[in-house]
Amino acid sequence: MTTPEKTDDKTKTSLDASIKEGVFSAASSNMVWNYTTPFALHLGATTQEIGFLGLLQSLGSTLAQIPGARIVDRWSRKSIWYSTYFLSRFLWIFAALLLFLSLYQIVLLMILVFLITFFNGLRHPAWTSLMADIVPSEQRGAYFGKRNMLTGIAGLVALMASSMIVILFGFSVLFVLSVIIGLAAIFYFQKIYEPEIRREFHFKHSFSISPKEWLFSIRTHSNFAWFTLYIIIVSFAVAMAAPFYAVIMLKQLDIGYLWYAVIITIGALVTIVSQPYWGRIGDRYGDRTIIAITGTMICFIPFFWIFANNVWAILFIEIYDGFVFGGWSLVIFNFLLSVVPPEKKTSYIANYAFLTGIATVAGTLVSTLLVTSIESSIIFGISGLSIILFISFVLRLFSLLLMPKIHSAYIQKESEPLYHLAWRLIITEPAKTTTKFVGHVYDVKWLYRRLVELKNRFVYYIREKTIWKYRLFRTRYKAPG
């Protein structure tokens, strides 16, 4: 009778610790990764070198997936996380030293980015497998929606602080502070309970290039295969355009670091606010339905960038991007956990990440090789980077042809057609929520009650963590004499 209670307590503690660990990890990551491209431009990188920087970033993560799955069979998932996390954070110290060198700055930055993303990718299969065992399947949407919201808030605060740090102190101070904040996540991660990996039979990870084995796996797990193919195409299309958004903002339109930080911050804020919303409706209507809706909206992001010619247009695109990708990335992860074979969870997740990573590398490589040859070309009335954005737009539309092949792992009733549901979830309900919130803000009594409630919660938390524990200490241990 006591075992289930202990297990439940361990699970609750682990879920809470995972959120706190994610908060510090997200803060540390947002401080550096959003400023990697601006840092490279500050060092004098060309547009093609920016493309290769994004290429090595994707390549490092991709190459780490298969060995990351193999080492799970030899070491515990937490030990893998500890070692790779520390190395990936500590290497940013060397990035801070690049400003003091006079030669090979861009080359050394590329090497560091490759190594950091390699260690990040090395722990991804272990972390995903651990989360799949800890988080109950019926709570994944709500839990990861809450976790992503809180980690997003932490990343948002870190992002806003980063812009001021760069302007006042420079990139080196930014990188050192990110390392210090990132190491704090280790304290909370050690509180996470690691259950034994559940296997129906002994299985050792493998990645085969035999067509017969591929055909057998596709037939056996066709839903997972079609889903993986869909993500491969989308990853390729996204990777073609993603490295050059910062180039358009900072190099072509020259909006400056301050506006760059404001725009990225607002996009991140929209993602944070939308995460709990997408998590709730994902649990209600099914992840596959949300993938179909958000996957269609994702197609138009590079198309909008073609016509971006001022700060306000970019701001609109970032708001749209944050809202759509906030739901898409959440349900993609939840859908992956539901369709992956449970007895081969770590292996299939690693293979999925490897294949989608290869697509990301290929997309970045293609766009990087094309960028120098098309700068003076005109196709369909567009030129330069706009050609790459248009190709990305067409490929994303093509990925929608695979959507009918993907089926939900759980049977859920849809009471209305998909286009009616999309209109209600994207337009009607967010508009009602926004209107209600604005009405509450102008309701002085409601706002006063909420402020008092926040104040009481803060005071209670401070007393619980400090004063009450101090009084308890004084009652148990009296001072000598």
Image (cartoon, helix red, strand yellow):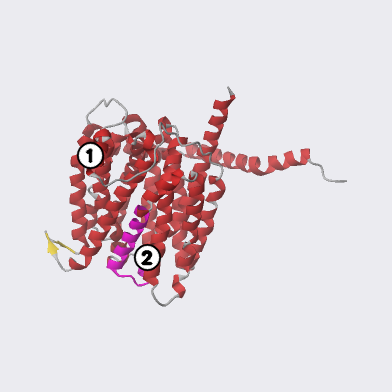
Q: Toward which corner of the image does residue 201 lie, by quadrant?
A: top left
Residue drawn at x 42%, y 39% is: 144
Let me know if residue 53 is in the magenta part.
yes
Give SS at disc 2.
helix
Which amino acid is tagged 1?
Leu
Give SS at disc 1.
helix
Q: Position of residue 369 (x, y in %)?
A: 23, 64
Is 158 placed left or right of 311 in the picture? right
Residue drawn at x 51%, y 39% is: 194
Above-or-below relation of 116 to 414 = below
Q: Position of residue 11 (x, y in %)?
A: 52, 34
Main secondary-structure element of the magenta-colored stretch: helix
Is 35 placed left or right of 209 in the picture? right
What mark, if any, has residue 118 been given in the picture? none
Which amino acid is tagged 2?
Met
Q: Toward which corner of the image does residue 116 lie, by quadrant?
A: bottom left
Q: Position of residue 132 (x, y in %)?
A: 42, 37
Q: Earlier in the sequence, mark 2 or mark 1?
A: 2
Name the residue beneath numbered marker 2: 110
Nearest the viewer among 480 and 68 is: 68
The segment highlighted magenta reads 40-62
The outermost residue toward the top is: 1
Number of residues whose C-alpha sits closer than 10 Å to that of mark 1, classed few (under 14), some (14–19) or many (20 or more):
few
The outermost residue toward the right is: 481
Of badges 2 and 1, nearer the viewer stands 1
Nearest the viewer among 308 and 454 is: 308
What mark, if any, has residue 215 been given in the picture? 1
Q: Position of residue 256 (x, y in %)?
A: 36, 65
Let me know if residue 302 is in the magenta part.
no
Residue 62 appears in the figure: yes
Q: CA distance from mark 2 to mark 1?
A: 37 Å
Number of residues whose C-alpha sits closer than 10 Å to that of mark 2, classed few (under 14), some (14–19) or many (20 or more):
many
